[in-house]
Amino acid sequence: YGLILCLITTLVTLSLFTRAPVHADILRDRRELYRFGDEGQVENAYQLKLINKRETPHRYAVSVIEPAGVLIQIPSEIRAPAGEVINVPMTLSVAEGQIRGGVDVVLEVRDLDEASVVIREKTRFFAPTD
């Protein structure tokens, strides 16, 4: 029993030290698949859910990694209080005709207070097929 207890203690300690300090979920707006913006661009609306698992407040920046040409509308700096979950509205857009159907979009969430903390999340972008 001592060996099992030692193993469990080691695994719990290891998981506490290696857990990600931030978690992100990208939730699509379910009301509409896509919409057209004022300048004719195709837009998709999302909610970015950020969970700051730290005991101190942190600042984050979100950017599009791929595909090229996808623009993001979100505050340039997102402040998350210690241990809090925040929801931030976000819009991705492309020029009309640049994307057809659905494509995967990769977003990067970067901790501005600790450069080593970077996570990538994938979501789906939808546009007209014709």
Image: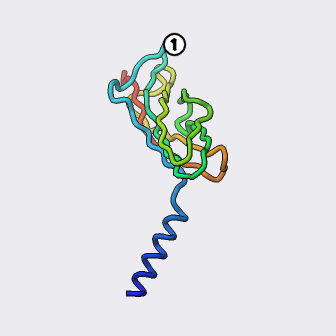
Q: Which residue lies furthest to the top in this view?
A: 38
Residue 38: give x, y in percent of width and height. 49, 12
Q: Can you say which quadrant of the picture contains the N terminus?
A: bottom left
Local SS, label 1: loop
What's the residue at 47%, 16% (across, down)? 37
Disc 1 residue crowd, few under 14, some 14–19, many 20+, Cα 10 Å: few
Residue nearer the viewer, 112 or 68: 112
Which residue is label 1 attached to? 39
Q: In the rendered image of this protein, does residue 58 appear above or below residue 1?
A: above
Q: Which residue lies furthest to the bottom in this view?
A: 2
What's the residue at 62%, 41% (across, down)? 59
Q: In the rendered image of this protein, does residue 17 appear above or below residue 35?
A: below
Left of 35 or right of it: where is 67?
right
Left of 119 or right of it: where is 123?
left
Q: Can you say which quadrant of the picture contains the C terminus?
A: top left
Q: In the rendered image of this protein, does residue 114 appear above or below residue 99?
A: below
Q: Does the rendering let one see residue 121?
A: no
Residue nearer the viewer, 21 or 2: 2
Amino acid type, residue under disc 1 in the picture? Glu
Q: Does the rendering let one see residue 44?
A: yes
What's the residue at 64%, 53% (across, down)? 116
Residue 99: give x, y in percent of width and height. 45, 27
Residue 86: give x, y in percent of width and height. 49, 38
Residue 120: give x, y in percent of width and height. 52, 46
